[in-house]
Amino acid sequence: MQPMTLREQDLARQLEECQEALRQSRRENELLRQKVDLLIRRVFGSSSEKLDQAQLELLLQLPKGSVLTPEPSPPKAAASPKRSSRQQTLRLPENLPVLEEVIEPDPVKQKPQDWRCIGQEVSEQLDYEPARFLRRRTIRKKYVHRLDLNRAPVIAPLPERLLDRSLPAPGLLAQILVGKYCDHLPLYRQEQIFLQRHRVSLPRQSLARWVELAADWLKPIYEQIRTGVLAGGYMQVDETPIDYLEPGHGKTKQGYFWTFHRPGGESFFDWQTSRAAACLESIIPSTFTGVLQCDGYSAYPSFANGRGQAIELAGCWAHARRKFYEAQEQSPKVAGWLLRQIQNLYRIEADLRERHAGPQLRQAIRASQSRPIVERFQRALVRLKSRGRYLPQSLLGQAMDYALGQWPTLEVFLKDGRIEIDNNLVENAIRPTALGKKNWLFIGDAEAGQRSAIIYTVIENCRRRGLDPFTYLRDVLARLPNITNWQIPQVTPQAWGKAQRPLKQPTSP
């Protein structure tokens, strides 16, 4: 075989370069196709595990060339057989007031003395009366002494109010707050509802001032809740973007609600105009020591490192699982096996919840059952990573890098029975704000952010305690002008809910 000439060697080199460039282009085209597919499914696909903007930004903070693939929608369950009309009948709540209407037959109406009642048939319907406005008039009579005409007239003092000469009563304030922060009705919609359905004109500017008034009065309750969460030594944290109006420009900027939750306890929101680590410095006092559970956002380790050994970060297995779920379509065998290991961990946690296990029992069962699964999971990741079969830019490569990078934090739940396996509880607390911002779009100026955080905190803790937020707010706003700071712990949602429970009657011997 004759050696190639210089011209042939040059052509062979060019051919090899072209083939390599073609392979690289195909690889980049496949990665870009996956990214476009993710964005299309995120906008138009199923809502199951749909990513919001903050989650997408977090997941896109990956090495250059990384892509995301959406989780495939779970298969739809087979349609259940049609229920009979007996099964579809709703049970009327027993606690509702009853309005009775007695209907007599015409023959009985004509000659009631000829008839004797032998029984009755009762049918019920569920009815509704719309809300109504009313004028609450307080009348204070003046009196003079019949005999001592020189004595000055006497009159009862006016009951304390949230604001002197204020028009709204506690019930109206409670309705406005619940309408905006619980039912997600912007103030301009409430203004239209009041005018069109009740013929009551309440300008939006007045509604906004009343919301500010209520937030100022609720602030001591907010501070009491906040202090309790920060004093627990363990809390979960997450942040969500919220737009606010930039003064003087008519444009919106992006701020953030930082949400903190103590599992088994309360939650509180804090408003910041950024999501930098400095925000955590301003929220969490320097005296705080304990565990902070969070996702992989870089601000959290930066904050924890600045506090030395005072704060330990705990990871979230739900975030780690999500990345392997995204890689399942490209690597079904390996990603599927890894997902099954995580599923086994969650089965153990579900069993612990059913048993209402305390921290000690959870720690013991995790040590005997969960730890072997976690160690097997880590060995598999290290083995797969050392073989170099999956490129770092591939979906499975990204998932493995994320899990191994977060590994010290993912193991924290094994050694402390207080720690949850994931951060889902605090993410659940954020959901009402996500629903609200789709309706009211932005919260107003930057100062309005903290007022919204106060009201969201109160309503979220009512929701977690199973309390009606309107009933709570109406009662508390009526009582706040007459109580001292020492009595504030008695009107938090937790304490108020306990006080409303009927006392158990002693059983007879």
Image (cartoon, rainbow, N blue to C red):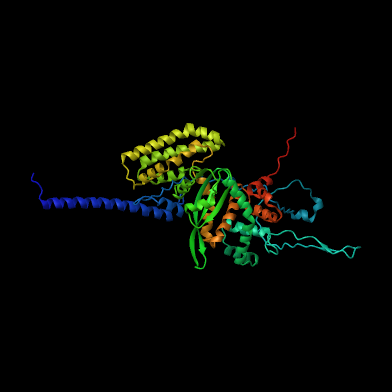
State the image coordinates of residue 183 (x, y, percent, origin top left): 58, 56
Which residue occupies the foreground of this view, 360 or 430? 360
Which residue occupies the foreground of this view, 150 or 361? 150
- 117 sits left or right of 365 in the view: right
State the image coordinates of residue 99 (x, y, percent, origin top left): 71, 53
**Can see residue 273?**
yes
What residue lies at 90% left-to-right and 63% top-to-bottom? 148
The quadrant in which the C terminus is found is top right
What residue lies at 19% left-to-right and 50% top-to-bottom? 16
What residue lies at 53% left-to-right and 52% top-to-bottom? 282
State the image coordinates of residue 464 (x, y, percent, origin top left): 59, 47
In the rendered image, the vertical position of residue 321 relative to residue 445, given as above or below: above
Q: Residue furthest top?
A: 368
What residue lies at 51% left-to-right and 41% top-to-bottom? 420
In the rendered image, the vertical position of residue 430 relative to residue 193, given as above or below: above
In the rendered image, the vertical position of residue 248 relative to residue 88, given as above or below: below
Q: Residue furthest left?
A: 2
Q: Residue furthest right?
A: 147
The quadrant in which the N terminus is found is top left
